[in-house]
Amino acid sequence: MARTFELETLKMRMGDAEFQQLDLHQRIQRALRALILGGALGPGVRLPATRGLALSLGVARDTVENAYVQLHRDGYIVRREGSGSYVSDAVGAQLRGAGRGTRPGDARRAAAEPGTGLSRRGRTIFGSGGVADQQTVKAFATGLPETRTFPTDVWERLQRQVMKDHRANVLLHGDPQGAEPLRKAIAAHLNLERGAVVSAGQVLVLSSARQALFLCAQLLVDAGKPILMENPGYFGARKAFEAAEARVVPIDVDAQGIRTDLLRADRSGANCVYVTPSHQYPTGATLSLARRLELTRWAGGNGGWIIEDDYDSEFHYDGLPTACVQGVDCYQRTLYVGTFSKTLHPGLRMGYLVLPPELVGAFSRARSVMDGHTPQIAQLTLARFMDDGHYNAHVRAMRKLYASRRETMLDSIGRHLAGIATAVRPAGGLQVPCLLERGWTEEQTIRRAAAAGVLLPGISRLYAGTDRMQGWLLGYASLAGHEIEAAVLRLGAALRTR
Ligand SMILES: Cc1ncc(COP(=O)(O)O)c(C=O)c1O
C-alpha cells in the first residue's frame, strides 16, 4: 500500500465520471475514499492540511474541511489535534483481511466473470438465458397483441376515478391475494366465458402468467424431483421449472394435445403436469374432452396437480373455445393460470392463478414473501374496466381484428413463402406455426431473415430430445394487414436470395 499522499492522483480520481454530478466537497470526499479503499492511500498515510489542499485544488478551505469531516465521521480517517489527519488503521486492516487493495489506485476490483459467486440454483437461472421479451412491435415476434389501439383514454378515466374514490388507501400495501373487486371480476369472467367453477376466494392476483408458473414450481416441486410438461412446450414454463431445480420430463403432444396414454404410462414419479389445453403451445392443438377428463382422473387418482395455462383462450376464431379443464375437474386438482398480457397488453403486468381451496393460503404467503402484491391502483382500475364492460368489448374487437389478420397472414405465407414453409392454420391465438420444407433449415432461415430485419422465432427450441420439427412460430396479431403483407414479402425475398 502507498505510504504518501499524491496530489495528482487525487486530482485524477476527482475527474472520474461517476463523481461529476456531485458537489465539490463530495467529489473530494469520494475521491479520497476511493483512494483509501483501493489501497492508494494506506493506513497511517498523512493527508495534507485542509488549508494546503484547498490552495492546491483552488477551492475554499471549508470545502476540504467538509470532505474531511465526512471521512472522519465514516471512520476512513482519524484527526489528531495539532498533528493532522491520517488514514485510519482500522480501515487498512479490514481491507487486508478482505484481500482488497491489491491494486493501488484502483478503487474497485475488476469485474468478475458474470455469474461468479452464485448458488447452484442461481447458476441454473443465469445459464437458462432468461426470457427475452420483445420490447418493440416487430414482425414476427410471438405473443404480442395490438397495443396501438388500446383505449388508454378509458383506462386513464377509470384510474382517476379509483384514485378519487379510494384516496390514500390505494397508496398503502394491499392484500397479497389481490384486491377483492378484481378477484370477483376475474371469477365472474371465468365462470361465464371459460366454463370454470371459481369463487373470488380462489383467485390469486399476480403480475403475470410467468410469476404464476414460478410460484407453482417453487411450491409444488422439490429440487431434483420430476415435473411433467408438454413436448413441444412453452419455454417460459420450462425455465420456471428448471429455476426451481425440478427435472422436466417431456410428454409428447399430437393433434389432440398432450398424449394422456403417455401420461398414464409415466413412471418418473411426478405428480404435477403443465399443459396448455385450449391452444397447445406451439402446435395450436385443442385438447379433446376425453383427454381433459382423463387428465383430471390422472390427477385425482395420483394426488397430482394439473397446471393449466390458458394463455390465449379468448382468441378463438372458429367457434367457441372448449371449456377449461378447471371447470370439468371434479377432483379439484387444477391450478388455472391466466394472463392479461394478450387480452389487454403485456406492459400491464397482470395475471392470476385460480387455486384449489387448500392451496390459497400457501400461495398467498409465498406471494407475500416474493414481492407483497400487485400495485393496487392498477388492480382496481382493471376491476372497473371489467365491471363496466370495457374488457369484453375490447376482447371482442380484438378477436375480430386478429381473425382478419390471421387470414392476411395465411394468405401472405401461401403466396410469398411457397416452397419454403407451410403454415399450419391455427384455430386461435396470436401466432401461426410454420413448418419448413425439405432443403431448408431453421438456423439458415433465421439468420437470413435477421439480416433483412425480420425476426423468426424458431420452433425446434421448444422441443425436448433430438426429434425436433424445423420451423417457426410467427406472431402476427400486433401487426396491421399491410405490415404483415410487407414483412412476409421481405422475408420471402431475403430467403430466396442465396
Ligand atoms: C403459453 C404461454 N404462457 C404464458 C405466457 C406469459 O404470459 P405473461 O406475459 O403473463 O408472463 C406466454 C407468453 O407468451 C405464453 O405463450
Image (spheres, rainbow, N blue to C red):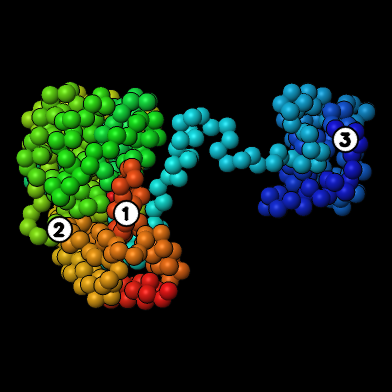
Q: Nearer the viewer, residue 444 or 299?
A: 444
Task: Answer yes or no: is residue 189 visible.
Answer: no
Mark 1 or mark 3: name the one nearer the start of the chain: 3
Location of residue 22 with respect to 172 vertically, above or below: below
Q: Nearer the viewer, residue 177 or 456?
A: 456
Give the total of numbered labels: 3
Report if the CB atoms under discs 2 and 3 are less than 8 Å apart. Answer: no
Where is residue 205? Give x, y as percent.
26, 39
| Residue at image point 35% right, 64% down | 440
Location of residue 63 with respect to 226 vertically, above or below: below
| Residue at image point 23% right, 64% down | 423
Callout in the foreground (2, 3): 2
Where is residue 344? Give x, y as percent.
25, 55
* Beta carbon at label 1 within 8 Å of ligand 1: no
Name the mark on residue 234: none
Q: Amino acid at mark 1?
A: Ile
| Residue at image point 7% right, 30% down | 330
Q: Amino acid at mark 2?
A: Ala
Callout in the foreground (1, 3): 1
Cα distance between the residues tagged 2 and 3: 73 Å
Mark 2 or mark 3: name the one nearer the start of the chain: 3
Name the mark on residue 427: 2
Task: Answer yes or no: is residue 418 visible.
Answer: yes
Report if the CB atoms under discs 2 and 1 are less than 8 Å apart. Answer: no
Q: Neighbour class for label 2 at 10 Å: few (<14), some, many (≥20)?
A: some
Q: Secondary structure at mark 3?
A: loop
- Looking at the image, residue 463 sits to the left or right of residue 191; the answer is right
Residue 138, image quadrant: bottom left
Name the mark on residue 2: 3
Q: Amino acid at mark 3?
A: Ala
- Looking at the image, residue 282 sits to the left or right of residue 448; the answer is left
